[in-house]
Image (tube, rainbow, N blue to C red):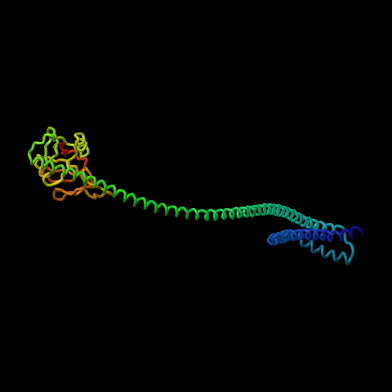
Amino acid sequence: GKGGEQLRAGPSSGCRRDTRGARTSWTWIQILTLPLRARVTLSKLLNLSESQFLGRNPSAQGSILRAQRSRVVLVQEGPRSPSVFSRELGTWGRWGQRLLFLGLVLAVATVLWALILNILVSKASTERRALLGHQDLLRTNASEQSAALGALNREVRACNTCCLGTQKLLQRARTELGEAQAKLIQQESALKELSDRVTQSLAEASRDREGIRTELFRALEAVRQGNSSCEECPESWLPFQGSCYLFSVQRATWEASQQNCAGAGAHLVIVGDLEEQGFLSRNTRGRGFWLGLRAVRRAGKIQGYQWIDGVPLSFSQWNTGEPNDSMGREDCAMMLRTGMWNDAPCENEKDNWICEKRRSC
């Protein structure tokens, strides 16, 4: 009857629904490209669940076999009793529920996995678009920077060209300036040499004039006419060959000594010959005296000596080993107590001085 047909149709329709659910699940899995490892794991899980179910329920195995046999017998023999079909239907119902539950679990997992993949893909797409936009911006900036760099390079080349021209002009100006300075130095040297010659000539002329006066005074004294028109030497001054000499009793530096002589209308003594040297030596009285003689120093080296009137040294009476310019500081000359000459520092305050001035006639 209808009940038997429903019983015969019930298990096969449940199997078809389970089969369609499984196929749908696997279709979703294939569409979403689930990893092979997930499919293998799920297959093992299904097999394990089925084996555990059948292993724990031997009666279920018998029920399945009996159901299959009864299905064949029903087809061949016709309907059986309702109790037998009820038991078989209950067994297949429980098994179908479990398969349906597993299918639902797989479907939910698939949907969740699809959602996660969709979120990840959407996020990756957003980041990719942002990166592409940033890359375009960087390219634009790089192009602008390249253009600016090219402009700067052109400006630098122009500046270098200008600087090279300026350097050439500056070098030419330096060369011309050097030549002008060299000519100026030569002219200054020639002018100084000429000035020195003129000064020396004037000093020599003045010395010659004084010598002529001295010779004339000697001649006048030789006649012993007692020429009263010539002034006598001041007190404490000693006369000799038409000049007056003062041997000081104070001590001072060379500069201070010259100032003292100038205050008396005289100058530090100038020794012209051996006779004058003998006169001075006889009156030293065991003391040292400054002479009107100084060193001429250029570039730190002594080039010679000249008297205070600018005449170069010709007659000298240096002591043995003198002048030695000890420590590069001995620029002034003095007469030792023995009458010999020695070079000494001009700032020495241990010596006296000798002043000399011509007698007026």
The residue lying toward the viewer, choosing from 19 and 14, is 19
Vertical side of 71 occupied by 244: above or below: above
The residue lying toward the viewer, choosing from 109 and 122, is 122
Q: In which quarter of the image is the N terminus?
A: bottom right
The residue positioned farthest toward the top in the image shown? 235
At x 44% / y 52%, what residue is drawn? Answer: 173
Place of residue 94 in the rendered image (x, y in percent of width and height, measured from the top left): 78, 56
Vertical side of 265 occupied by 150: above or below: below
Q: Quadrant of the C terminus?
A: top left
Q: In this view, does 311 lie to the left or right of 155?
A: left
At x 19% / y 43%, what residue is drawn? Answer: 209
Place of residue 338 in the rendered image (x, y in percent of width and height, measured from the top left): 10, 44
Place of residue 322 in the rendered image (x, y in percent of width and height, measured from the top left): 16, 49
Residue 332 visible in the snapshot: no
- Splitting the image into 4 quarters, where does residue 153 fall? bottom right
The residue lying toward the viewer, choosing from 174 and 105, is 174
Place of residue 45 in the rendered image (x, y in percent of width and height, measured from the top left): 70, 59
The residue lying toward the viewer, choosing from 247 and 49, is 247
- Splitting the image into 4 quarters, where does residue 308 fall? top left
The residue positioned farthest toward the bottom in the image shown? 76
Q: In this view, does 113 lie to the left or right of 13?
A: left
The number of callouts visible is 0
Residue 139 visible in the snapshot: yes
Q: Is residue 25 left or right of residue 155?
A: right
The residue positioned farthest toward the right in the image shown? 1
Q: In this view, does 91 lie to the left or right of 324?
A: right
